[in-house]
Structures are given as C-alpha cells and as structure tokens.
Image (cartoon, rainbow, N blue to C red):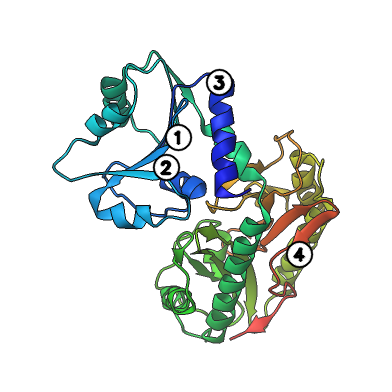
C-alpha cells in the first residue's frame, strides 16, 4: 500500500465514521502516512485530515524544510516556539468540530484538554484500531525494509559474538553491539540491548551490568535495530565453553519449541494454538512453569506491535503479518535460554526472515 493509498484508506474511514477532523499525532503514524520522519519532542506535530478538504501537516518551524521534502505531497504549516500550535490548528479547521478522531494511545490528558479548547468537538472517537488494522498487513516495500533491518542486526550479532571472551563484562558487549549498530548504518537500537551471562540469563528482561563471562555459562543476546523506520528483533543463546548436560537439554527443548511454533504459523491459525504448540511441548519436557511469557508479538514500525501471540488470543493469523517466535526457559540460579526468530505469515505458511544459526554454538 503506497502512501497515497494509505491516505485514501484513512479518508474512506473518515467517511464511514462521519468524522469531520481526524488528527494523527504519533510520529510513527505521521511517517506511515506521509514518509515524513521526525522526533518533535515536546513540540506539537500533527497530520490533519478534514472532511472534503486536503490534509495538511502542522509541524514545528525547525522541521518545515524536512516536512516539505517528504515523499507525500502535502501542505505544511509550521509554528514557532513562541506560537500556540492549537490556534493554527483552529485556523485551518472548521470549528466547532462535530466529530473528532484521535489516537487515544498517544494523546495525553493535557493535549486532549487543549484540543477540546481549540476545536470544541461534540464527540471524540479512537482511530487507533483502524490504524492498527492497516499496519498489521505489511506491503512488499515494508517487508523489504524489515528484511534489511534483520540483515543489519544479524551482522551486528555476528560481529558482537567475535568479541566474546572469558572475563568480558556484559556491558562491554552491549557497548560493542551498539557501536556496530551505528557503524553498519542503523538509526538506533530498537530497544535496550540485552547481553546476559550465567544466572542473569534466567531473567527474561534482565539488566546488563558488570557481571563477567565465565566458562560453563550460558550467554544470551537479545537485540534489534531501527533501519529506515522499521524494527528487527532477534535473540540467540550461546554456550561459553562446555556447559552442563542440564543446560544443553534446556537449550534443545527451547530450540524444538521454536521450530514447532514456526511450523504452526499459517494464515487462519489461531494465535492461542500457535502459542500452545510451543508451550505444550515445553510443559511435556517438565519446564512449563519456567516459560514465563507469551510466545511472540508483531513487528514493524514498532518493535512490539499487534498481534500479541499468547494462549488467550483467539484471533487468527493473516497473510502479511510479521511476528516474533521466541519461546524461553528460565531456571533461577542456573540460567536461561531464549531463541527468537522474526517470521512472515505467508500464504503457504511461515517464512522465517531471520537466518542466524540456531544450533547450540560454543564460543569464548
């Protein structure tokens, strides 16, 4: 779906829901509909759709030039730091507004009060579900961007693994990975990079610190990048030298659970059933209580987006979705294993976009 097609889709939604004004303020969604990427910080940024009129961008003055160069041809109005952007919004919208659409996940209470004072809407509805629906099916262009993001993060991981040595601290490796991200062209990490060694690897969202790598440990890497606006997310777990038979067994159970879940991915598959395909196997091997989180999540403009693949989600997968498959087992005091792949729901089934090997590798 091109930028113009996305704009047409949201304008059709306006007609269907009888909206007079539809306001998009999430910078990621402004980018999704216009190709204009920015971080306005505390300043007001808005993409405004109006009934029977052309849409426009309302941006901080320092972003005017970039906004006017955006791929989508769209009118741009800019506000100085000394100006009230809500007065500009009011000027370019017919007020009072009978029905206003906003992203309720993004608009703060204070901003809502300012919008109400400026536009005087009689009714406000949440447009977030419609945008989520548009975003969840990826276009070929989006898939290409996601694939490029994955290729980049796999290069980062490959370089990072070369730096592993006995005595290295978790934070040393985090620094190396994030250096490689920038060196290879990433915009930014997609989330806080995780490098967890030994017993710390049993913490699914542990914090890397001064702990040092020792022989016999598991070493877990969880990292992702943003590249051209799209995220990647991969987890791999390694052995430092020779690890115990128990840890080897845990690794193989997680790897098999990962593969079973991937085989369950196809259009029409119920997400709860996909989760259970991994969870039931892990439980049958005696580690059910140690699988502490959902199986996976959507991936795209956000590193965590719709859908959420867990045991209570009775919705079905649809062709074009991109999601993670990341089962894990976490044994306190001993260590944890997580193996995460990024997967496209293709018409024929799962297409695994990550390529980094999953066989247990001994490093260090």
From the viewer's perspective, is residue 186 above or below residue 61? below
Residue bearing the label numbered 1: 105
Element type where label 3 sits in the image: helix
- Nearer-N-terminus badge (1/4): 1
The picture places residue 273, in percent across and down from the top left corner, at 80, 41
Judged from this view, the residue extending furthest toward the left is: 82
Q: Residue at x 58, y 69 (%)?
A: 220
Element type where label 4 sits in the image: helix
The picture places residue 152, in percent across and down from the top left corner, at 57, 73
Near-viewer residue (361 or 72): 72
Cα gap from disc 2 to disc 1, whole angstroms = 9 Å
Residue bearing the label numbered 3: 17
- Nearer-N-terminus badge (2/4): 2
- Nearer-N-terminus badge (3/1): 3
Q: Is residue 114 left or right of residue 9?
A: left
- Nearer-N-terminus badge (3/2): 3
Element type where label 1 sits in the image: loop
Cα gap from disc 1 to disc 4, whole angstroms = 36 Å
Judged from this view, the residue extending furthest toward the right is: 348
| Crowdedness near tag 3: few (<14), some (14–19) or many (≥20) residues, C-alpha within 10 Å | few
Whether residue 200 is visible, yes or no, is yes
Residue bearing the label numbered 4: 255
Are discs 2 and 1 less than 8 Å apart at CB? Answer: yes
Classify the position of the C terminus by image quarter: bottom right
Element type where label 2 sits in the image: loop
Q: Residue at x 58, y 58 (%)?
A: 332
Q: Nearer the viewer, mark 3 or mark 4?
A: 3
């Amino acid at each position: 779906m091109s930028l113009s097609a996305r704009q047409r889709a949201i304008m059709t939604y306006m007609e269907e829901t009888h909206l007079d004004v539809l306001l998009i303020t999430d910078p990621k969604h402004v980018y999704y509909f216009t190709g204009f990427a920015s971080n306005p910080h505390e300043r007001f940024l808005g993409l405004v759709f109006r009934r029977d009129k052309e849409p426009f961008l309302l941006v901080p003055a320092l972003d005017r030039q970039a906004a006017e160069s955006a791929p989508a041809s769209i009118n741009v109005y800019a506000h100085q730091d000394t100006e009230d952007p809500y007065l500009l919004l009011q000027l370019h919208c017919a007020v009072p507004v009978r029905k206003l659409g906003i992203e309720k996940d993004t608009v703060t209470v204070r901003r809502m009060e300012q919008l109400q004072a400026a536009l005087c809407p009689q009714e406000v509805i949440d447009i977030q579900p419609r945008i989520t629906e548009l975003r969840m099916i990826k276009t070929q262009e989006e898939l290409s961007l996601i694939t490029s993001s994955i290729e980049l993060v796999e290069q980062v991981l490959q370089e990072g693994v070369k730096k592993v040595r006995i005595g290295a601290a978790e934070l040393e490796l985090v620094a190396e990975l994030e250096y490689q991200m920038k060196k290879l062209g990433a915009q930014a990490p997609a989330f806080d990079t995780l490098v967890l060694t030994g017993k710390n690897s049993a913490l699914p969202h542990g914090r890397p610190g001064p702990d040092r790598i020792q022989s016999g440990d598991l070493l877990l890497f969880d990292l992702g990048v943003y590249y051209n606006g799209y995220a990647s997310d991969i987890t791999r777990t390694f052995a430092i030298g020779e690890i115990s038979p128990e840890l080897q067994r845990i690794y193989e159970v997680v790897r098999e659970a990962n593969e079973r879940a991937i085989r369950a991915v196809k259009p029409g598959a119920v997400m709860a059933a996909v989760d259970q395909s991994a969870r039931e196997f892990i439980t049958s091997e005696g580690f059910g209580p140690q699988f502490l989180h959902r199986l996976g999540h959507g991936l795209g403009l956000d590193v965590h987006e719709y859908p959420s693949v867990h045991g209570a989600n009775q919705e079905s997968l649809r062709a074009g979705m991109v999601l993670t498959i990341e089962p894990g087992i976490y044994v306190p005091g001993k260590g944890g294993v997580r193996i995460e792949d990024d997967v496209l729901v293709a018409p024929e089934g799962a297409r695994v976009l990550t390529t980094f090997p999953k066989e247990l590798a001994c490093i260090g």
